[in-house]
Amino acid sequence: MTEQSAVNGAAEAPYEKRHILLNAFDMSTVGHLSPGQWKNPSDKSATKRKLSYWIELAKLLERGGINALFLADTYGGYDTYQGSIDECIRRAAQWPMTDPSIPITAMAAVTKHLSFAITASTSFEPPYLLAKRFSTLDHLTDGRIGWNIVTSWKKSAFKAIGLDNPIEHDERYRQADEYLRVLYKLWESSWSDTALSPDPENDSYVDPDQVRTINHQGKYFSLNAKHLVDPSPQRIPFLFQAGTSSAGSEFAATHAEAIFVSGHSPSVLRPKIDNIRRLTASKGRDPRSIKVFATITPIIGRTDEEAREKHAELLKYASVVGGLVLFSGWTGIDISKIPLDQEITEADSTEAHKVTSILSNFTTPSKENPKWTPRIVAQHAAIGGLGPVPVGSPQTVADELERWVREADVDGFNVGYVTTPGSFEDVVDLLVPELRKRGLYPPARGEEEEGTTAREKVYGKGQKGVRDDHVASGYRYDVYKEDEPYFQEN
């Protein structure tokens, strides 16, 4: 992908055709963004508790040259709709949910080029434990691991760990900023590149003088330890971040290498994406180095007519209530209380804890959706949920992807499914060949071709570690300086 420098520090580069990055968007649950499809005989979502599901999916995505399998996660149920969690459970709306990190190594064992991005929160575990897990995964995948950084907001999740209320929205991001800096110290500052230097004659495997103790005394975290894992291929997993609120955008401009955005119209997302690129430039980073992935759930047929028939069939199994459960949880709006044709506004969100960027997307009018009402939300919520659902032939869907790249300035897409693996098969067998024909997708890799890390797939061969303009580069072993302890004045 061609790296462009922004004009005068802004991100207003002219549109040019470039390779589109595709991630497969899945979740270790029955009802991800299209609840109800478990009733569809062609859907295999209910088999996700079997390792074979993940192994076969990885093989399919590898065959299609997909950039990464992007796995969402959550830590509690949705209980805003009707003030109860019952419909979340009943409709299998992201319930039940298993741990997305467990199948990764099995998928890595049957692939060579596919990367993996796992969602993990900065809210529920100490940085030391997360650092160990991701270093391990980076080793075992040969550097093909990424982390989707989230800050958690659900009351049900905080209550599950013994806290009555979530942390306030902007405070979560301030905490997350420190969390990342602790991780950079562990991943980059603790081990020298030459610390692991086996010397059989002197019975020495690691030189302890080259493994630094990290002493961090901050506002939110304290740590006095050496990183337990030797440097992995990337040292730092490729960093995704989701969210475009003011605090989320500032965090992304500082830490993210890619951001995951959701919206039903490119015109709604474009100002947010431009803002993140401006913020990125203001921090001395190349604004084109931060890659933007938008959610999209295509329904693809060999012809437009076949795709429309597929869509009609899928609607028979859709759970509208399940979709509204997700909408209510994300936005903090109990949509069950609003008349069907009344316009929804941000004022309807009475819940303090929510995904602010999703609330904004569902209350901002656009050409595609001039007014959001419960009736309109219901049409979107049951299939695709967070983003557009283009229905058509490979040519029609490819046109739509190009339009989003041109109008929203995205670099790629997190491609959701309606049924799995069927939706992903259509992407691999129908859409990818069309994108390749247009010069918008990398050529197929040969079996003998050497694998690359998750970061190299985005930035080019040789870029295993973070770029020199990324904040984490200031934590490298040879330039590390210990921070002064945090001191809070009375």
Image (tube, rainbow, N blue to C red):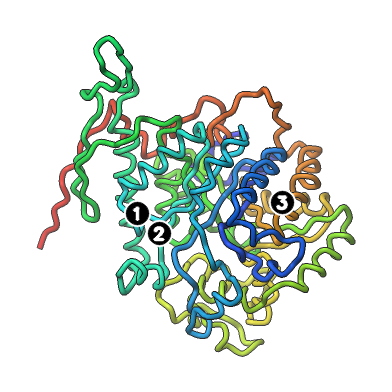
Circle 3 packing at 10 Å, graded few (<14), some (14-19), many (20+), is: many
Task: Name the amino acid type tagged 3.
Answer: Phe
Question: Marks 1 and 3, Cα distance to the nearest angstrom?
Answer: 33 Å
Q: Quadrant of the N terminus?
A: top right
Q: Which of marks 1 and 3 is in front?
A: 3
Give the residue drawn at x 70%, y 67%: 37
Q: As rendered, which of 30 and 74 lies closer to the eye?
A: 30
x 48%, y 84%: residue:
83
- The residue drawn where x is 50% and y is 40% is 145
Q: What residue is shown at x 84% (from left), y 54% (from top)?
A: 393
In the picture of the structure, the residue carrying the numbered disc 1 is 176
Rendered view: 449 above or below 284: above
Q: Mark 2, residues whose alpha carbon is within 10 Å: few (<14), some, or many (≥20)?
A: many
- Can you give x and y, in whole percent of width and height, for residue 488 in the image? 14, 57
Total numbered badges shown on the rendered structure: 3
Q: Which mark is residue 424?
A: 3
The location of residue 466, given as percent across then percent down, is 43, 34
Looking at marks 1 and 3 on the same chain, the residue that comes earlier in the sequence is marked by 1
Q: Is mark 3 on a helix, strand or loop?
A: helix
- Which quadrant: the C terminus? bottom left
Q: Which of marks 1 and 2 is nearer the N terminus?
A: 2
Compared across the picture, whether 445 is left or right of 155 comes to right
User: CB under 8 Å between callouts 1 and 2?
Assistant: yes
Residue farthest along the top direction in this orientation: 201
Mark 2 / mark 3, whichever is N-terminal: 2
Q: Which residue lies under the disc numbered 2?
A: 151
Which residue is nearer to you in this view: 229 or 399?
229
